[in-house]
């Protein structure tokens, strides 16, 4: 079976339940006992949208949430906060602070003995990560995991693509449908610089009424309540880039 044959079933999933079952099956074929996938979309600077597909032990996931371990988790910091792209192997180079080591030791009690985390960053400002874990902690298990780092990263990419279609393109997010025109982006960028409607009109050599039209259109697409909200949302979602 080729790599594509292994991952293609993810793109045929139509529900979250099917996506979970298919991911668990593929992770198992790669030699992992557990997985967790999460994606964060900065639709709000203070309340970003998060979607979690949990294949970890439920008890550990509940403890992670209860104690807000996301705040100290170096894998989350690497993949989501810092938006790095290099895979993270779980070792003492990653979990090195007292709180991080404590959290890592707790996770081992739930069977997450060795693992790695993989980042995926989409074109709409979303940041996602897939963590894969094994209940084995032998030298061979670690070497086996390292030998399939490429396939694991490919799984993360396929899973994110499937999640975008099944989850992120529906409901209030509509990521795949949210596109700004070039003129809307230009008006938002100049508005972000503090320019008034009249000043933007002079810069772009259009009427102030046309500037207002483009800013309102952009705001409506993003569900923004005012000009400042539209600027913040466009920046946080990566729809405009300084």
Image (cartoon, grey):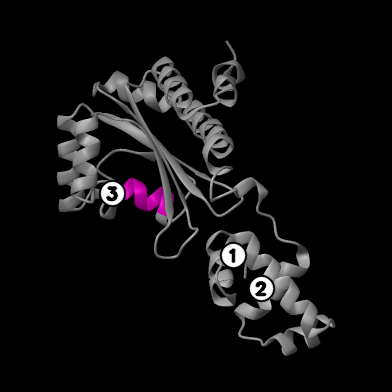
The residues bearing labels 2 and 1 have C-alpha atoms spaced at a distance of 8 Å
Q: Are marks 2 and 3 in contact (CB under 8 Å)?
A: no
The part of the chain drawn in magenta is 73-80
Q: Is residue 221 above or below residue 36?
A: below
Q: Give the image location of residue 115, x and y in percent.
A: 32, 31
> Which residue carries the number 3 mark?
73
Label 1 environment density (alpha carbons within 10 Å; few <14, some 14–19, many ≥20): many
Name which residue lies at 59% across and 76% down. 227
Q: Residue at x 84, y 81 (%)?
A: 206
Residue 240 visible in the displayed image: no
Q: Is residue 50 above or below residue 113?
A: below
Instruction: Report the quarter where the N terminus lies.
Output: top right
Question: Does 91 sit above or below residue 69?
Answer: above
Q: What is the secondary structure assignment of the residue under circle 1?
A: helix
Question: Residue 220: which disc?
Answer: none
Give the mark nearest the N terminus, 2 or 1. Answer: 2
- Main secondary structure along the magenta-highlighted residues: helix
The quarter of the picture where residue 108 lies is top left
Q: Are marks 1 and 3 in contact (CB under 8 Å)?
A: no
Residue 77 lies within the magenta run: yes
Residue 51 in sight in this render = yes
| Residue of label 2 | 188
Viewer-proximal residue, 20 or 95? 20
Q: Residues within 10 Å of mark 2 (few under 14, many from 20)?
A: many
Question: Looking at the image, is mark 2 or mark 3 earlier in the sequence?
Answer: 3
Residue at point 74% right, 89% down? Answer: 198
Q: Nearer the viewer, residue 4 or 192?
A: 192
Q: Nearer the viewer, residue 211 or 116?
A: 211
């Amino acid at each position: 079976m080729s790599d594509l044959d292994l991952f293609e079933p993810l793109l045929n999933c139509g529900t979250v339940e099917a996506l979970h079952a298919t991911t668990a099956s593929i992770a198992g074929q790669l030699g992992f006992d557990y997985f967790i996938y999460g994606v964060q979309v900065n639709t709000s600077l203070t309340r970003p949208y998060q979607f979690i597909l949990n294949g970890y032990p439920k008890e550990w996931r509940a403890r992670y949430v209860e104690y807000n371990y996301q705040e100290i988790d170096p894998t989350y910091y690497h993949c989501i906060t810092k938006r790095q792209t290099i895979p993270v192997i779980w070792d003492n180079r990653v979990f090195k602070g007292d709180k991080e080591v404590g959290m890592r030791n707790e996770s081992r009690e739930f069977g997450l003995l060795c693992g790695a985390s993989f980042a995926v960053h989409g074109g709409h400002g979303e940041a996602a990560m897939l963590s894969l874990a094994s209940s084995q902690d032998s030298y061979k298990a670690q070497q086996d995991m390292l030998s399939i780092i490429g396939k694991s990263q490919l799984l993360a990419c396929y899973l994110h693509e499937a999640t975008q279609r099944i989850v992120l393109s529906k409901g209030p997010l509509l990521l795949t449908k949210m596109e700004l025109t070039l003129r809307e982006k230009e008006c938002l960028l100049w508005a972000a610089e503090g320019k008034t409607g009249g000043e933007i009109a002079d810069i772009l050599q259009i009427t102030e009424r046309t500037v207002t039209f483009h800013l309102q259109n952009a705001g409506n697409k993003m569900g923004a309540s005012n000009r400042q909200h539209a600027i913040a949302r466009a920046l946080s979602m990566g729809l405009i880039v300084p």
